[in-house]
């Protein structure tokens, strides 16, 4: 499953406009790129029902060469082979692997370590980059921007279950007991299944789209 064609095209128009606005010196070209950005916003608003002004504001906040946004997710396993999950308050307390956006001046491994501690209270050590997946190619709900997520298998080093402003519960689950009410914007069932596969067989190659 992939994103609808109109969303793919609108993202591409926005990316062309953003990059053009960043590097063009010709005032007429700058006007055309700005018009393209407004067009991309109107297309997304028409198909999504969102306010065009809100989408334009999000696009206006993006500058420089257009690239995908990078997210990180952690597959942390305990000694019993259970995986760590958290309830996301931003998505009606549905379950997901801990994670979020990669931070500036942090490596992806540092970012995923921070996210686990902030969302679940545990200290972990990334031991394997298990997957690098393009969000749009995995059937997740559409988003304005292109997103790539890096999934790390992590070793548990210490800490204790602690919730945060972003999470309402922390839990450990065997593969057969993974909750059905997942935050599908963040983590999909087949992605969790692949993390169990990588934990059982550390020699598996990193997966990517």
Image: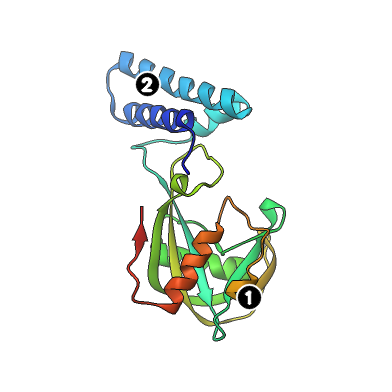
Q: Which mark is residue 53?
A: none
Callout 1 crowding tier (Cα within 10 Å): few <14, some 14–19, many ≥20: some
Residue, disc 1: 172
Q: Nearer the viewer, residue 63 or 186?
A: 186
Q: Position of residue 197 (x, y in %)?
A: 45, 72
Q: Is residue 125 visible to the viewer in this orientation of the structure?
A: no
Query: Residue 81 at what x, y percent from top left?
Result: 54, 81
Of the two numbered discs 2 and 1 on the same chain, state the one appearing first in sequence: 2
Residue at (49, 33) in percent of width and height: 4
Residue 35 % position (x, y):
43, 17
Residue extending farthest bottom: 79
Q: Of 108 and 28, which appears nearest the observer?
A: 108
Residue 120: horizontal and vertical position, in percent? 62, 70
Quadrant of residue 187 within the rendered picture = bottom right
Q: Is residue 71 above or below residue 146?
A: below
Q: Which mark is residue 33?
A: 2
The label nearer to you, 2 versus 1, is 1
Q: Is residue 196 visible?
A: yes
* Residue 154 sits above or below residue 192 on the image: below
């Amino acid at each position: 499953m992939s994103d609808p064609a109109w969303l793919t095209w609108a993202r591409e128009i926005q990316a062309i406009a953003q990059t053009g606005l960043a590097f063009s010196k010709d005032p007429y070209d700058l006007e055309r790129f700005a018009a393209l950005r407004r067009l991309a916003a109107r297309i997304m608003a028409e198909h999504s029902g969102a306010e065009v002004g809100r989408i334009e504001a999000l696009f206006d906040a993006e500058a420089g060469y257009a690239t995908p946004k990078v997210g990180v997710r952690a597959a942390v396993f305990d000694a019993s082979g259970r995986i760590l999950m958290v309830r996301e308050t931003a998505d009606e307390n549905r379950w997901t692997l801990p994670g979020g956006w990669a931070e500036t001046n942090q490596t992806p491994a540092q970012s995923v370590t921070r996210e686990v501690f902030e969302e679940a209270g545990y200290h972990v050590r990334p031991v394997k980059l298990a997957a690098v997946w393009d969000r749009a190619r995995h059937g997740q709900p559409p988003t304005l921007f292109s997103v790539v997520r890096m999934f790390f298998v992590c070793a548990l080093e210490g800490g204790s279950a602690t919730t945060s402003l972003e999470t309402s519960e922390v839990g450990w689950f065997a593969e057969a007991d993974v909750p059905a009410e997942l935050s599908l914007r963040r983590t999909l069932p087949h992605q969790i299944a692949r993390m169990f596969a990588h934990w059982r067989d550390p020699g598996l190659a990193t997966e990517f789209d």
